[in-house]
Image (tube, grey):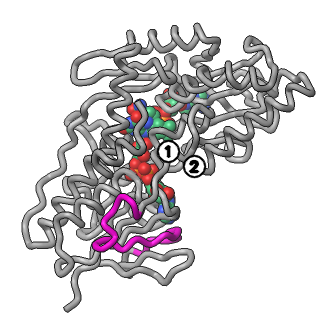
């Protein structure tokens, strides 16, 4: 007898939690579970700013997918999804035959939002995946090596475009990394320029004012220059051009100006806003009872009809929800509505500093940094229990 086929696209926060939850809930005679991911490993996106700056090795930010799933219950396919064909109930892959599904879970993450800014795609770097952060680190180090020979200031000027959480966390890592890098290449630390450019009138728009001031003061004390109310309008091979025409010459430009949903979701024909799908209370795509969108490609609204920001936190909760509730649906039950429970936000400013709000408590400095580490360890715990925490976690 054939059993329903569940296909999960993407082994990120949402996809992995869904796969693990379903494998736990459903017996093999109840459903066939397939997980597709382009790499053999899961990358820990929330850690990627570290290898991008060179403060940790990229292997700390990835782990083998088969090592964290039950491969007896989950059929893992390493391949790149090239198209989602909703009418045919089929997913097309780069190297394998198309996959038929009865239920589809899309957790393909996000893509950089460039707002059509000229030259960004061609000339800037992005903190996206293992390959992209390795490229940033190696490029930056090569520029430092060249400076030692050529003494051109732009070689040791780094522009970070966007001072949201990704931008600020990355700048925090750069601050930690610079003393070592300068020693390595015989460069006086004070010669290095790290410029964080933000279009909004403040760094971390919308976040607690006192915590933002703390972060800015700390990072400025380490030499970071902030340019606020200053949109980047173009990125060239030489650097960036700001609104008003001012140019900053920089050999390394890292764009952290925001994200949009994965383009495969847009291309499937589902209605999207900046590539993200406004899902229903069961995380389904409008008009499709059997298609669920989770993580950065989904849009969930709060009681004030404002969208929750795309985070690992909400993606994880969506995956946990679907792992339980899709199993209930398969057994003929009613799915409960998804309810997001925000636990707070903590952002690192390098290894020893951070800012955050947890519940209604504000944290800054060492206590926030400790909390951030606990949050990061929790993800390893959810994936592989205490043994994975001990193997991968660093306090
Ligand atoms: P992802 O985790 O992005 O995973 C998507 C998966 O799909 C990947 O494995 C990818 O390889 C795969 N994939 C994509 N396209 C294809 C394809 N065509 N074929 C096959 N596979 C494909 N959020 C927080 O809550 N807390 C934080 O501290 C935090 N820190 C962050 C730090 C940084 C530097 C960044 C960049 C983001 C951070 N975020 C944080 C945001 C968070 O990482 C994302 O919201 C989260 O990763 C989204 O999870 P997801 O499940 O949607 O997708
Ligand atoms: P974001 O959208 O949160 O921030 C992008 C920033 O870039 C904004 O401040 C925006 O004003 C600015 N910007 C846009 N266009 C610009 C331009 N032309 N010139 C200069 N600045 C410009 O994006 P992000 O920081 O990549 O974060 C993506 C998601 O990941 C968010 O939901 C965020 O909350 C989440 N995240 C969370 C954490 C954490 O919890 N520690 C860390 C990183 C990311």
Q: Does the segment drawn in magenta span residue 55?
A: no
* Residue at 35% over, 48% down: 388
Q: Is residue 261 visible?
A: no
378 lies above or below 289? above
Return the x and y of residue 255 as percentages of the image width and height. 61, 36
Q: Mark 2 or mark 1, which is nearer to you?
A: 1
Chain part drawn in magenta = 66-85
Left-right relation of 51 to 98: right
The answer to which of marks 2 and 1 sits earlier in the sequence is: 1
Q: Secondary structure at mark 2?
A: helix
Image check: 282 left or right of 197? left
The image shows residue 182 at horizontal and vertical percentages of: 74, 21
Q: Is 70 contained in the magenta span?
A: yes
**Spatial separation of the CA atoms under disc 2 and disc 1:** 8 Å
- Residue at image mark 2: 130
Is residue 344 visible from the viewing direction of this image? yes
Of residues 21 and 231, the one drawn nearer to the viewer in this rendering: 21
Residue annotated with mark 1: 61
Q: Secondary structure at mark 1?
A: helix
Give whichever of 366, 31 is nearer the camera.
366
Image location of residue 129, percent across then percent down: 55, 49
The location of residue 333, given as percent across then percent down, is 7, 67
Q: Is residue 287 above or below residue 383?
A: below
Q: Is residue 58 left or right of residue 232?
A: left
Residue at horizontal 30%, vertical 15%? Answer: 362
Residue at image coords 51%, 17%: 201
Question: Is label 2 in contact with label 1 (beta carbons under 8 Å)?
Answer: yes
Q: Measuring 45% from the left and 25% from the top, which residue is drawn there?
A: 348
Seen from the viewer's position, the closer of residues 46 and 67 is 67
């Amino acid at each position: 007898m054939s059993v329903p086929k569940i296909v999960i696209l993407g082994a990120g926060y949402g996809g992995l939690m869904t796969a693990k939850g379903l494998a736990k809930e459903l017996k093999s005679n109840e459903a066939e579970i397939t997980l597709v991911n382009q790499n053999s490993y899961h990358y820990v996106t929330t850690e990627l700013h570290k290898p991008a700056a060179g403060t940790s090795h990229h292997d700390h930010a990835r782990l083998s997918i088969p090592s964290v799933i039950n491969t007896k219950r989950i059929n893992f396919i390493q391949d790149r999804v090239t198209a989602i064909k909703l009418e045919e109930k089929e997913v097309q892959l780069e190297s394998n035959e198309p996959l038929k599904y009865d239920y589809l879970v899309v957790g393909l993450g996000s893509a950089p939002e460039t707002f059509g800014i000229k030259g960004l795609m061609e000339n800037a770097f992005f903190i996206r995946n293992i390959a992209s952060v390795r490229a940033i680190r190696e490029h930056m180090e090569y520029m430092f090596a060249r400076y030692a020979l050529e003494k051109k200031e732009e070689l040791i000027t780094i522009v970070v475009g966007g001072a949201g959480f990704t931008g600020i966390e990355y700048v925090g890592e750069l601050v930690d990394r610079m003393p070592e890098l300068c020693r390595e290449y015989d460069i006086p630390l004070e010669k290095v320029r790290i410029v964080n450019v933000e279009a909004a009138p403040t760094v971390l728009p919308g976040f607690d004012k006192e915590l933002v001031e703390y972060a800015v003061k700390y990072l400025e004390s380490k030499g970071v220059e902030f340019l606020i109310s200053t949109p980047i309008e173009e990125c060239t091979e030489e650097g960036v051009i700001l609104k008003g025409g001012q140019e900053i010459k920089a050999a390394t430009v890292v764009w952290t100006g925001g994200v949009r949903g994965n383009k495969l979701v847009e291309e499937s024909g589902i209605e999207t806003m900046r590539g993200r799908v406004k899902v229903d209370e069961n995380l389904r795509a409008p008009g499709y009872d059997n298609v669920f969108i989770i993580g950065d490609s989904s849009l969930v609204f709060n009681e004030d009809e404002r969208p929750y920001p795309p985070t690992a936190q909400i993606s994880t909760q969506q995956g946990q929800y679907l792992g339980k509730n899709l199993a209930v649906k398969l057994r003929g039950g009613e799915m409960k509505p998804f309810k997001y429970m925000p636990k707070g936000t903590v952002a690192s400013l390098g290894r020893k500093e951070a800012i955050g709000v947890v519940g209604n408590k504000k944290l800054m400095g060492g206590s926030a940094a400790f909390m951030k580490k606990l949050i990061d360890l929790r993800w390893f715990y959810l994936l592989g229990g205490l043994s994975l925490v001990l193997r991968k976690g660093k306090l």
